[in-house]
Image: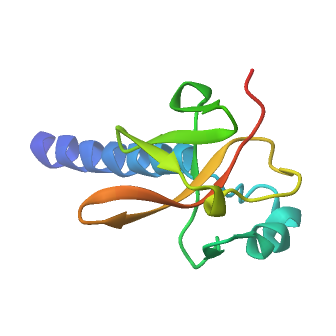
Amino acid sequence: MNDDFRYATLTILAVMLSIFASGLARAHDHQRPELNSWYESLHSGKGPCCDGSDAKRVDDADWDSKNGHYRVRIDGEWVDVPQEAVVGGPNRAGRTMVWPYYQDGHPKARCFMPGSMS
């Protein structure tokens, strides 16, 4: 019985940690439903940002800007953000976000919205 209890406890802990970790990585704030229509309206020159996938939050250390060009670290790889992927307008969420896609196994930015570096 102790082994069954230990297994159940570890399973529950693993599920809770994965939910918590995935919540940290997601940019769409489900605690602020008033932003849902704003998220759905976002688009770049590459098309709509929210296509059913969610943006990833980007920490300040994982993006930068130089000479008007952005780059962002996605899955540990630095990616140059093409100008057509930059989302214009005010960032109502306040934090930097990227909507990635993958080509030949490498991440690319479909949409990128800078926040304010602190």
Q: Name which residue lies at 46% across and 52% down.
A: 19
Q: Is residue 88 above or below residue 77?
A: below
Q: Is residue 18 left or right of residue 106?
A: right
Instruction: Kindly indicate the quadrant of the structure image that contains residue 88.
Output: bottom right
Q: Nearer the viewer, residue 67 or 103?
A: 67
Quadrant, the C terminus: top right
Based on the displayed image, in which of its 4 quarters is residue 31 positioned?
bottom right
Residue 42: where, in percent of width, then height? Answer: 76, 69
Which x, y percent locates residue 48? Answer: 66, 77
Residue 107: x, y in percent?
37, 56
Number of numbered discs present? 0
x and y percentages locating residue 34 in the rendered image: 89, 65
Residue nearer the viewer, 56 or 16: 56
Q: Would residue 65 be found to the left or right of residue 36 on screen?
A: left
How are the colours assigned in the image?
A: rainbow
Q: Residue at x 64, y 70 (%)?
A: 49
Residue found at x 64% / y 56%: 83
In the rendered image, which quarter is residue 77 located in? top left
Residue drawn where x is 64% and y is 49% of the image: 97
Which residue is at the far top?
118
Indicate left or right for 9 with 79 as reference.
left
